[in-house]
Amino acid sequence: MPKDSGIGASPKRREDQRFLTGNGNYTDDINLRGQAYVHFLRSDVAHGRITSIDTTAASAMPGVVRIFTGDDFEGVGGIPCGWQITDKHGEVMQEPAHPVLAQGKVRYVGDAIAAVVAETADQARDAAEAIELDIEELPAVINMKEAVKEGATKVHDDLTSNLCYDWGFVEENKPAVEEAFANAAHVTTLELVNNRLIANPMEPRVAVGDFNRSTGDSTLYTTSQNPHVIRLLMGAFVLGIPEHKLRVIAPDVGGGFGTKIFHYAEEAFCTFAAKALNRAVKWTSSRSEAFITDAHGRDHVSTIQLALDADNNFTALRTDTYANMGAYLSTFAPSVPTWLHGTLMAGNYKTPLIYVNVKAVFTNTVPVDAYRGAGRPEATYQLERVVDKAARELGVDPIALRRQNFITEFPYATPVAVEYDTGDYNATMDKLEEIADLKGFAARRAASEAKGKGRGLGVNCYIEACGIAPSNLVGQLGARAGLYESATVRVNATGGLVVMTGSHSHGQGHETSFPQVIADMIGIDESMVEIVHGDTANTPMGMGTYGSRSLAVGGSAMVRATEKIIAKAKKIAAHLMEAAEADIELKDGAFSVAGTDKSVAWGDVTLAAYVPHNYPLEDIEPGLEETAFYDPANFTYPSGAYACEVELDPETGKVSIERFAAADDFGNIVNPMIVDGQVHGGIGQGIGQALLEAAIYNEDGQLLSASYMDYAMPRADDLPFYQVDHSCQTPCTHNPLGVKGCGEAGAIGSPPAVVNAVVDALQSMGKDITHVDMPLSPARVWTAMNE
Amino acid sequence: MYNFEVEQPTSVADAVAALGEEEAQALGGGQTLIPTLKQRLASPSKLVSLSGIAEMQGMSADAGVLSIGGGTAHATVAAGTAASYPALAALAGNIGDPAVRNRGTIGGSLANNDPAACYPAAALASGATIVTNAREIAADDYFDGLFTTALEEGEIVTQVRFPVPEVANYQKFVQPASRFALVGVFVAKYPDGVRVAVTGASEDGVFRWSEAEAALSANFNADALEGLSLSPDGMMADLHGTKAYRAHLISVLTKRAVAAAG
Ligand SMILES: Cc1cc2nc3c(=O)[nH]c(=O)nc-3n(C[C@H](O)[C@H](O)[C@H](O)COP(=O)(O)OP(=O)(O)OC[C@H]3O[C@@H](n4cnc5c(N)ncnc54)[C@H](O)[C@@H]3O)c2cc1C
């Protein structure tokens, strides 16, 4: 029976009312009295030495307030990196300075050189064009393997090379892994590229800096997934503003996908300039600017090898990856190819020995950082492609090979440092076989072939680590932040609740699903619960939303705070009913005394808390407001099995996705409709990566796909209807809701399914093709077929 | 965008006069020009809007010739020629998105002559006549390479006259990002022969594939194209397709167009 409220129900998303009727309040909707506008003069060369900047003429242009250059930021901190990696030799990574405005050199097309603040945005842009700039062009460092060769041009002159780090994981496993490969009955090797992507949230980035000269308070309005993180990074590392003098507000945010996690130079600039000029300063990214300034995602070049014994058991796995960092280290960039990638290389399989090497490389390109899935899609793609290739080489059924090697006992400690608490990979595979109607595939292939088309089926599994994660653990791994989450639950006198959470919603529907949880705990209507987020002034220190952590970590914090509320409310109820606290039960919004017909309503108790006339003042304080911080004991491990069916037109190489099925295990589900939506969106992005999207630089470091004319976003007609199921549920064992996270699964699980399907189609058409790099555009597929 | 003035004449004569000024430029539907201005890649001091000129709007058919006003929007063409010239209607109905089709005009498209645009293929394959304020130009003399046409400075496309073929079809293979034509082939069969025009492929812009025309004029059947192919030399190459791929697509699409034209 579908429920109509509380956990498990699918109420419509309450936030959509304002988003769809133009009542949202996005950062660009914020206009402050007297605000000025900034336009950044950006480098149009990938690498060069700034030999002179003359702003004299530009400064005299109409409306110009002031022009800032790198010199104005001497003594100001650079943009910090939030994660330090220690390499396989025990050395810490090379960490270049990342100035707010370029100092001496420009390092990618889009690097900000000067910032013009003027009365209007157009005047700022006009004046930026009048800045006289001389740049001595240097050779661009683009190809990662070239970049790490002896004698290569250096992106950062003061670093010893372009190698940020050379990470080995687990280094001690390496000899055993080598030995297992030497003894293997079969070794499958695959080289592949995980294509560079641009997140393209619907709302481009915006920042508005404000300063109050009377109080000395700074405020930043910004398009962020995590305002507290921005406050900490920018306040402590860049501008030297203590938290109590800095407020960061991320109002409605129109999509993030990871790219709005990071602290960007434009945020620091607007905050800095607002103080310097004593007036608000606003920056709104154009879409063209977004292409060359939003952190990009993925961009790994990998070689993966799988060793199997004579019975087709996986005996060892090793992988070598070059991971592009771009020109500077974005906030979490170093963690993505390492801890978010290496730790996932076991996947769903009990491979006993694994060694992961990652070389992170600086290039003259836009910084690369987390993008939906972050590291986990890269791991899943390698693993699920190589397993597929192994099955083909061995002539065994790819599903059977997977099942044979599945982890079946939990908890399971992988050889790559994580412990899966729970899962049931055969259950999701069974479910997949059912919903994808794999039995009907042969008939569907025959029908396609009768039309002169090829048809392929691709299946894969995935595991991800979400709900990132215990602070003490991530601290050991190099995180320069904790990864708990917080919530304050404020109950008002008449019984309504306001939940102030450190999680941030930018498309996830928190304002709908979080109240379902709280209302369920108390037994009241969801409409009595309101969610407040996105403002450091009225929410407790939180770490924000990414890594599918909001419900698992932020939701757990809310549960803990609500538990405290209920405990206190029971004391009050006990007092009101003159009963023992231990006998008080809360059900359907009323407190009763066990075994009696005495009861008081939720609202009577909350009123008593604020009008404490008849109240145990000697024992408890008035009021009903509690805060909890929740630091999880482990990651959560959602998993699933995906199937994709493609049709391939041999004449043009065009691939069309005919069917796509996803069987996920997200543990317990709060709002099935929102989960469906998250999976749909994730699969859409995964299909985008697999078939359409690619950020491509030429050797001079110009981004060739710098607009929608050349960067292909998935559109409705590129996507099929999905069969999505999340009825397989192994609840997380260590958080109070038993939830695992669903935001990234689709983007993680779908690319290998698509590529496996296309390879299957090609093979069925008699082509001896074992791999084609993404995106599988018609031209690439046709070229592969005709080489 | 830089600042500019806008003039909104109501007759071709007034528009021509306005365009006589230094740095004035015609504005059709603005679907190409406005993005160009926004990126500050052009800086006309005056835009002369053609959308208020009644004599440049609408369609009429007479003696096998379909005449379309140069200011007619793609959506209007798509709706208005479905019966008289279905292949052209389908082409117009497949340009861009609804906003582009409701604003963009046939005159603007032909004046712009984007190497990946659709209308140039229709005009060339139909042996259309491009009528301007000053003269009539045969399509064969009109297209002059990428973004270049026979139009003089300030000359306005006021009308396009399409001889209506017996049968025709346009096959557009879309570039995945822009959804312009990665390659587009328009095949039109007339009593005196078949014309085949190709857009999106050549470094010289839209062109006629004469071997295919000869073969199809002799036998209007996809089989007649068997063995015919174009050299990749001179084709465009970019992120979305190599020269060889484009050359190959031309053959595939031409066959499909013939098969679809029936
Ligand atoms: C998202 C998008 C997708 C598109 N997809 C396609 C597609 O799939 N296929 C396709 O063919 N096109 C496509 N287009 C282009 C579209 O068809 C444009 O409308 C067309 O190319 C230009 O027509 P316009 O009326 O908008 O001209 P404008 O943009 O106003 O002008 C373009 C140029 O022509 C000049 N001009 C305009 N009208 C005249 C005239 N009557 N006489 C002389 N000069 C004139 C202008 O001065 C300017 O130089 C797309 C455009 C967009 C924005």
Image (cartoon, coloured by chain):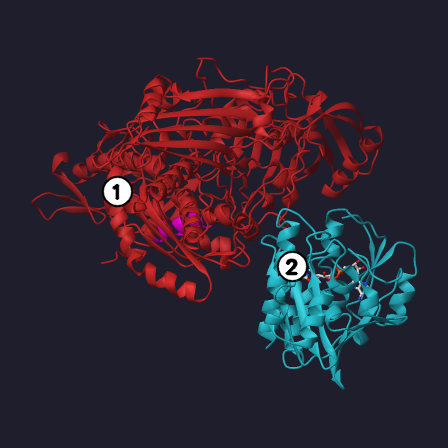
Chain colours: A red, B cyan
Position of A620 with respect to A157 (left or right) is: left
Pinpoint the chain carrying mark 2: B
Pinpoint the chain carrying mark 1: A
| Quadrant containing ligand 1 | bottom right
Which class describes the residues within 10 Å of circle 2: few (<14), some (14-19), or many (20+)? many
Q: Amino acid at mark 1?
A: Arg
The residue located at (53%, 47%) in the rendering is: A784
Which disc is residue A403 wearing? Answer: 1
Q: Amino acid at mark 2?
A: Val
**Secondary structure beneath label 2:** strand
**Secondary structure beneath label 1:** helix
Q: Quadrant of residue A350?
A: top left
Which class describes the residues within 10 Å of circle 1: few (<14), some (14-19), or many (20+)? some
The residue located at (42%, 36%) in the rendering is: A382
- Between residues A416 and A385, which one lies in front from this camera angle? A385
Task: Examine the rendered structure and indicate whether residue A140 appears above or below residue A600.
Answer: above
Position of A538 with respect to A672 (left or right) is: right
Q: Position of residue A718 (x, y in %)?
A: 50, 56
Q: Position of residue A299 (x, y in %)?
A: 52, 35
Q: Which residue is mark 2?
A: B183
- Between residues A616 and B65, which one lies in front from this camera angle? B65
Segment colored magenta: A673-684
Task: Examine the rendered structure and indicate whether residue A195 appears above or below residue A46.
Answer: below
Circles 2 and 1 in contact, beta carbons < 8 Å: no
